[in-house]
Amino acid sequence: MGWIIALVVGGVAGWLASMVMNRNASMGIFWNIVVGCVGSVVGNFIAGFFGISGSVQEFSLTGLAIAVVGAVVLLGIVNLIKRGSVR
């Protein structure tokens, strides 16, 4: 059951991050889930430096916020590599 929650939260986090980074039109549901799940790992890595912990497998607003921040950072890095600018 934890994996299903992780996929749903990852999809929502990826969708919110794509809305923030103005990439919503170019991403489908599959890529939203991928970006959200990978962004969750990136976000947990970044949050670990600040002593914040949040798990995506057990739904919490902290976990969702960490996943969204990680996904935004991930999309910013992808934009920087592909376009030469963060936005």
Image: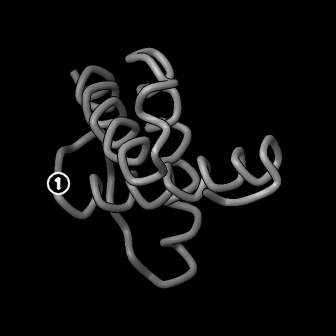
In the rendered image, the quadrant that contains the C terminus is bottom right
Q: Residue at x 38, y 61 (%)?
A: 66
Q: Residue at x 34, y 43 (%)?
A: 13
Of 83 and 4, the residue lying toward us: 83
Of 23 and 56, the residue lying toward us: 23
* Furthest residue in direction bottom, as rendered: 50
Q: Position of residue 69 (x, y in %)?
A: 43, 61
Of 15 and 19, the residue lying toward us: 19
Of 36 and 72, the residue lying toward us: 72
The quadrant holding residue 22 is: top left
- Element at badge 1? loop
Seen in the picture, residue 66 relative to 18 is either above or below; the reply is: below
Left or right of 31 in this view: 13:
left
Seen in the picture, residue 48 relative to 35 is either above or below; the reply is: below
Q: Position of residue 6 (x, y in %)?
A: 32, 32
Q: Residue at x 26, y 27 (%)?
A: 8
Amino acid type at image mark 1: Ser
Q: Residue at x 41, y 33 (%)?
A: 24
Left or right of 87 in this view: 17:
left
**Mark 1, residue position:** 60
Q: Position of residue 1 (x, y in %)?
A: 21, 21
